[in-house]
Image (cartoon, helix red, strand yellow):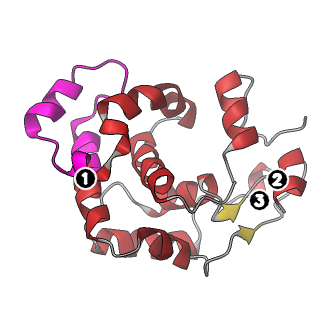
Amino acid sequence: MTRCFWCNDDPLYIAYHDEEWGVPSRDAQHLFEMLLLEGAQAGLSWITVLKKRERYRQVLFGFDAERLACMTDAEIEERMQDPGIIRNRLKLQAARKNAQAWLRLEDPVALLWSFVGGVPKINHFSGRGDVPAVTPEAEAMSKALKKLGFTFVGPTICYAYMQATGMVMDHTTDCDRHAQLS
């Protein structure tokens, strides 16, 4: 199988590329999880977060927004000692703050998908140099989420999020998944 330029030979990465990345998701739980994981990835490689994803699920209450919104400072400090996650206090505090903001949304799925008009945007990029890091849609999402109280949702994070959750389909045209998801 031919894959996108960014996919290395790690089996976890291959499975993520082949089964999840770019597949449209309208599942609120998945969308929330991915929003927090994309924020955790800031400044790091995605494979780093992917390898820690299962541990994140354990220590962040299965990405249960209601439980996570009530996470205490003591629980954050406890997690700061866990080598199975990225031990960054600001990112852990952001997970709690983002859970609180998520719970204030009337319909988070509709809000997030509104930035692409409710349907996946199918791109036809031929290679690495064609895929943008930011788009006007991602800038609009970032601005709106920040206004709603979210953090670690800059435009680059938002575009990566849109790619990961299939709001935009950025498998390159030389990748077998492009034809499958187009």
- Left or right, residue 116 beside residue 75: right
Bounds of the magenta span? Answer: 66-95
Q: Where does label 2 land, which residue? A: 172
Give yes or no for contact between labels 1 and 3 (Cβ–Cβ under 8 Å): no
Between marks 2 and 3 in the image, the one whose residue lies nearer the viewer: 2
Q: Earlier in the sequence, mark 2 or mark 1?
A: 1
x, y percent for residue 6: 71, 39
Residue type for callout 1: Glu
Give yes or no for contact between labels 2 and 3 (Cβ–Cβ under 8 Å): yes
The majority secondary structure of the magenta stretch comes to helix
Task: Label 3: state its secondary structure.
Answer: helix
The numbered disc on residue 66 is: 1
Residue type for callout 3: Asp
Q: CA distance from mark 2 to mark 1?
A: 37 Å
Q: Where does label 3 land, which residue? A: 130
Residue drawn at point x = 21 percent, y = 51 percent: 69
Q: CA distance from mark 2 to mark 3?
A: 9 Å
Q: CA distance from mark 1 to mark 3?
A: 39 Å
Q: Quadrant of residue 162?
A: bottom right
Task: Label 2: state its secondary structure.
Answer: loop
Residue drawn at point x = 84 percent, y = 63 percent: 182
